[in-house]
Image: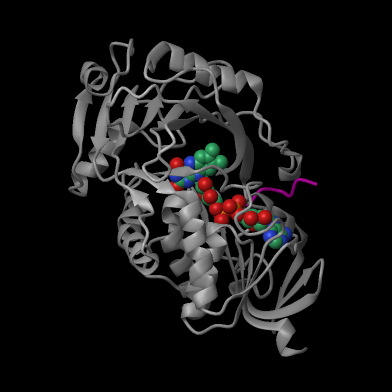
């Protein structure tokens, strides 16, 4: 096989996780190919929209330690690219403090912050209303502000990662869809809609599409559920109040998970537009290719209703709407899949899988962990919870 078709590492999927893994592997000296089915910086998968929530706090202490380990890597990426990517606006969690959600649990997370000596300020619902202008919050609502949380610039991060890939000699090809990944004793055969390649190691970073490549191994598939979640952009009336990112924890309704979050206008675009979302894990897609790019009108109306009830600084009429594919494990305690496919298929130790969860905040660390698993077969970080175990029978 020609040098053009043989790589040390092939990364399937050029979203932020795949780009980070490709960059870190190439920086370690590997010849790397990364391909993307839709194109780098596409808005069709899990990384659409302008912002992501940066938070260090997690309910699970081992994941909490991963976010703490990620923080300096964001600083390194910012220093390398000369651009602020994580904006420390603060992270405000409030609502029912004992409701378990896929995001976490307010009271248990406060306990975890105490345990790890991470600073936060506990706030009553009245104080949250007074300070940030929310209105008519239920009387029992309370929560915390973690000051170093905030918002990540998604497009800035993707541009920074593409730059790191270029600087480190990663070969980047798109649109190119990988159709099959076949590990064996002598490495991995990777078949695309353009060519057949051979690689010593492979990273599967195809997120919502990862099971298409795992299913043919015959060991089952990852227990991931894909939701096409609404993104709603609203005009901020501009009352001069400096607000953090916020997430409202509430008891679920009969129809949905009743969770809402919002970003203030971006410091990096200065357009006076706020983005809100319903975090509704309902109506999972049978196949990620069934995504329409159009949110359910009922979900957009739920966001506008929440704004009318509690957020007087926003115009409840959406300026625009969109969607994003949230890919979440069935077990919310797991949060992500991250590990090798050892034991699932012959040669599985040569394949690393990173998929699912609220993973944007962990992108710089996940790239490094993938590169370490490929080059050394291990990582110093505790990722036991995220191992490729508990697969479900393949959905045909
Ligand atoms: C509404 C919403 C809000 C979120 N909020 C947060 C948040 O606040 N904080 C946070 O940390 N995270 C958040 N997340 C999660 C975060 O956005 C994702 O974890 C992250 O963007 C996923 O990146 P990725 O690279 O794994 O996947 P993706 O960005 O989905 O990239 C996967 C790539 O693989 C490519 N691909 C797929 N199949 C193939 C194939 N066969 N061949 C080649 N290429 C292929 C796709 O084209 C795609 O570009 C949110 C997600 C959503 C949807």
Q: Position of residue 231 (x, y in %)?
A: 55, 33
Q: Is residue 23 above or below residue 14?
A: below
**Identity of the residue drawn at 25% across and 34% down:** 145
| Residue 393 is one of the magenta-drawn residues | yes
Q: Position of residue 47 (x, y in %)?
A: 56, 48
Q: Would residue 291 be seen by someone viewing this image from the given angle?
A: yes
Q: Is residue 239 left or right of residue 360?
A: left
Q: Position of residue 120 (x, y in %)?
A: 20, 38
Q: Position of residue 297 (x, y in %)?
A: 65, 21
What is the count of numbered marks? Answer: 0
Q: Is residue 312 above or below residue 203?
A: above
Residues drawn in magenta: 391-396
Foreground: 200 or 264? 264
Foreground: 98 or 208? 208
| Residue 226 is one of the magenta-drawn residues | no
**Identity of the residue drawn at 61% across and 28% down:** 282
What kind of secondary structure does the magenta stretch mostly adopt?
Answer: loop
Residue placed farthest to the bottom in the image?
Answer: 2
**Identity of the residue drawn at 59% across and 83% down:** 31
Foreground: 247 or 281? 247
């Amino acid at each position: 096989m020609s040098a053009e078709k043989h790589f040390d590492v092939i990364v399937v999927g050029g979203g932020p996780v795949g780009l980070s893994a490709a960059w870190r592997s190439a920086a370690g000296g590997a010849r790397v190919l990364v391909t993307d089915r839709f194109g780098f910086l596409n808005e069709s998968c899990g990384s659409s929209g302008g912002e992501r929530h940066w938070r260090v706090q997690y309910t699970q202490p081992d994941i909490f330690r991963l976010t703490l380990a990620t923080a300096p890597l964001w600083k390194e990426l910012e220093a390398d690219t000369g651009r602020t990517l994580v904006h420390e606006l603060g992270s405000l969690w409030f609502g029912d403090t004992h409701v378990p959600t896929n995001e976490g649990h307010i009271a248990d997370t406060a306990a975890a912050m105490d345990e790890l000596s991470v600073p936060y300020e506990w706030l009553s619902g009245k104080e949250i209303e007074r300070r940030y202008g929310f209105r008519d919050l239920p009387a029992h609502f309370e929560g915390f502000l973690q000051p170093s949380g905030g918002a990540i610039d998604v497009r800035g991060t993707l541009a920074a990662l593409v730059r790191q890939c270029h600087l480190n000699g990663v070969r980047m090809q798109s649109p190119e869809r990988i159709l099959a990944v076949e590990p064996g004793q002598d490495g991995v055969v990777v078949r695309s809609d353009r060519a057949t390649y051979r690689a010593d190691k492979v990273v599967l970073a195809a997120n919502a599409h990862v099971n298409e490549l795992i299913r043919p191994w015959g060991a089952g598939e990852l227990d991931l559920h894909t939701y096409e979640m609404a993104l709603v952009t609203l005009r901020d009336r501009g009352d001069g109040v400096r607000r953090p990112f916020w997430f409202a924890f509430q008891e679920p309704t009969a129809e949905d998970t009743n969770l809402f979050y919002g970003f203030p206008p971006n410091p990096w675009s200065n357009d006076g537009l706020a983005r809100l979302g319903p975090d509704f894990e309902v109506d999972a897609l049978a196949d990620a290719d069934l995504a329409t790019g159009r949110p359910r009108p009922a979900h957009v109306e739920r966001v506008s209703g929440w704004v009318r009830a509690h957020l007087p600084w926003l115009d409840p009429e959406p300026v625009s709407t969109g969607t994003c594919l949230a890919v979440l494990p069935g077990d919310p305690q797991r949060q992500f899949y991250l590990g090798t496919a050892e034991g699932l298929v012959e040669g599985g130790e040569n394949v690393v899988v990173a998929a699912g969860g609220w993973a944007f905040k962990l992108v710089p660390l996940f790239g490094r962990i993938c590169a370490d698993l490929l080059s050394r077969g291990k990582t110093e970080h505790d990722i036991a919870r995220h191992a490729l175990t508990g697969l479900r029978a393949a959905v045909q």
